[in-house]
Image (tube, grey):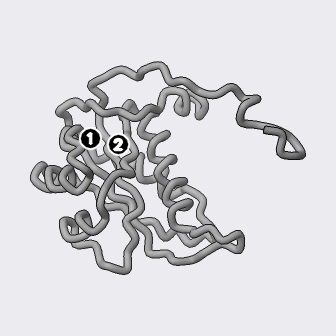
Amino acid sequence: MTVLEAIRNRYSCRAYQDRAIEQETLDKVFEAARLAPSARNLQDWRFVVVTDKETKIKLVQAANNQRFLQNAAAILVACSNSDHVMRCGQAIAPIDVAIALEHICLQATELGLATCWIGSFFPDKVRPILGIPEHIAIIELMAIGYPADKQKEQKRDSIDKILCYEKWRF
């Protein structure tokens, strides 16, 4: 599978098979995250992988009761220890973590897994469940597992709607 094929095949999966992910497969997924670029090469992302059924149920409650999460083989909790801000004013942590998570998504897709980004959650509810210290930012949750559904057609804007050259022309 090419990178572009992985990008085209990636989708937000909300139905998962009742099947664990082999450790070797998870290792490949996290190797992709480890190799992601980061601002100043800080590599300040940290991931908690949750596979325990009871803990996943608690995380469902912390994520607005999105019940499909408990059926995923794992829930990834992506965190950062960085409070650095780039000169442009953007915080580094959410950008770097998002890049690493997208590496996870693409590698997972190539390996026959599916993922779903979860931005609807309460960090203050997640923190005590996993024992995450106060100074660590919880950036994102992500479901990962073997898909039980098929990818639906995704509507995407045409290239001319999202791209211009030299000057703003939208």
Residue 113 is situated, as x and y percent measured from the top left of the image, at 36, 34
Residue 147 is situated, as x and y percent measured from the top left of the image, at 31, 29
Which residue lies at the image location 28% right of the left edge and 47% below the top edge?
Answer: 23
| Quadrant in which the N terminus is drawn | top right
- Residue tagged by mark 2? 25
Quick check: 20 above or below 55?
Answer: above
Location of residue 86 by image quarter = bottom right
Which residue lies at the image location 61% right of the left edge and 31% below the top edge?
Answer: 4
Q: Label 1's element? A: loop
Q: Amino acid at mark 2?
A: Thr
Location of residue 7 by image quarter = top right
Residue nearest the viewer, comparing 29 with 96: 96
- Residue tagged by mark 1? 21
Q: Are marks 1 and 2 in contact (CB under 8 Å)?
A: yes
Location of residue 148 by image quarter = top left
Q: Label 2's element? A: helix
